[in-house]
Image (cartoon, rainbow, N blue to C red):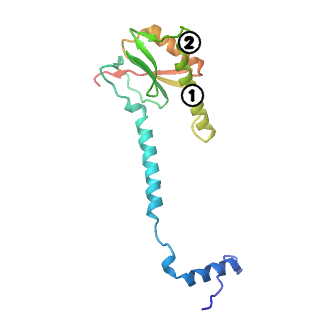
Amino acid sequence: MSAEPVENPENESNEDDDFLLMRRRRHGAANLIEGLNLTAMMDMMTIILVFLIKQYASAPENIQMSEVMRPPKSTVEEAVQPTVNIFITQKQILVDDKEVLKVAGGKIVSDKPANEALVPLNEALQKQVNRINALHDRGGPEFDGALMVVADQETPYELLYTILQSASRAQFNEYRMIVVANGK
């Protein structure tokens, strides 16, 4: 069986191309994979699906309100921008759905001295800043210093002020407060 040389786009014959063509003819067309590789496509679709589920779950519009969390009411409706979230409930403080501090009676519960009680909150916020900056280095959005605060309507101002001070130490300088629109 003789093989004719295959010409490349520059009309030059290449020995490697000839060798590969002869090898294919020897082994027959049954060994060639033709069409779509469904395994690779399923892997790709699974990765995309997981990415979309994680993005949708962390979208600001999906904040779940409950009896424990009752934000104050407002008549103004505005689109919620995605950012780092702090939830202040009557029992805990969460940074992006991870508990960092316990709350009781409108005060932070800690067995540490007052100057060390906020360390877990500071670390959690700094970790978020570092994460956003690392994403920015890989082509993601730039850190804008925005923080979304979701607090119960019964949250004392002193606790809210303390948390916002900690946030400012972690480079958050813009605060968005969540309120429930009237009638919703």
Q: Name the N-terminal-most of marks 1 and 2.
A: 2
Q: Position of residue 99 (x, y in %)?
A: 44, 23
Image mark count: 2
Examine the rendered structure and indicate whether residue 77 appears above or below residue 162.
below
Residue at 57% across, 36% down: 141
Secondary structure state at the residue bearing disc 2? loop
- The answer to whether residue 144 of the structure is visible from this angle is no
Quadrant in which the C terminus appears:
top left
Secondary structure state at the residue bearing disc 1? helix
The front one of 115 and 17 is 115
Give the residue at mark 2: 116
Q: Position of residue 169 (x, y in %)?
A: 59, 17
Q: Position of residue 11 (x, y in %)?
A: 69, 80
Give the residue at mark 1: 127
Dot 1 crowding, Cα within 10 Å, few <14, some 14–19, many 20+: few
Distance of label 1 from label 2 (alpha carbons): 17 Å
Q: Position of residue 58 (x, y in %)?
A: 43, 34
Give the amino acid at mark 2. Glu
